Amino acid sequence: MLNQRWGKIQKYVNKFSGCFASRTARNESGKTEQDKIADAKRMFEVQEKTRFTLDHAWILLRHQPKWIQIVQELDSKTNNYIDIDEDMNTCGNNSRPPEERIYHSKLKMKILQDGT
């Protein structure tokens, strides 16, 4: 039971830590740490479709040497950095979904046919 709970806590705190790290890395002028935490919470909510409710665990873990070591090990193993766009609605390489690409290619073909 405890291992299951710890697994869930670790999973969500890791994901939130990633959101917070990406918000911190943006180096936005005039933003306090509280603003960055609020932005990270919104980002987490968009990505996970649930609110981040483990603030107490994150506050306890974030500066612990063992936690920092685990996060660094995970970071070095994955090297999959997610590029977050300005409004935090999409993640990844910012390419269009397949159905949107098909729509735009058909639209271009129609414009080309109408123009000639």
Image (cartoon, helix red, strand yellow):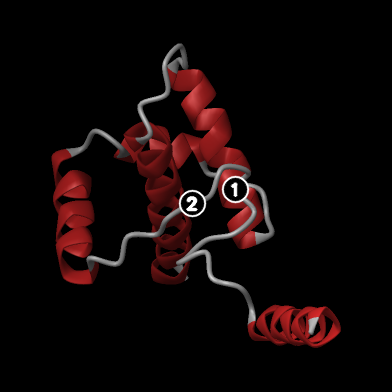
Mark 2: amino acid:
Ile
The CA distance from mark 1 to mark 2 is 6 Å
Query: What's the amino acid at mark 1?
Result: Met
Task: Judge from the rendering whether residue 13 lies leftward or rightward of residue 78; answer left or right.
Answer: right
57 vs 38: above or below: below
Identify the element where label 1 is drawn.
loop
* Residue placed under numbered mark 2 in the picture: 84
Q: Residue at x 45, y 46 (%)?
A: 19
Vertical placement of residue 83 versus 105, above or below: above
Q: Residue at image x 19%, y 56%?
A: 70
| 55 with respect to 83 (left or right) | right
Badge 1 is on which residue? 88
Q: Are marks 1 and 2 in contact (CB under 8 Å)?
A: yes
Quadrant of the snapshot with the C terminus: bottom right
In the rendering, at what x and y percent does residue 102 appear?
71, 87
- Per the image, label 2 sits on a secondary structure element best described as loop
x, y percentage for residue 10?
39, 58
**Depicted 9 relative to depicted 7: above or below:** above
Camera sees residue 53? no
Specify the farthest residue to the right. Answer: 114
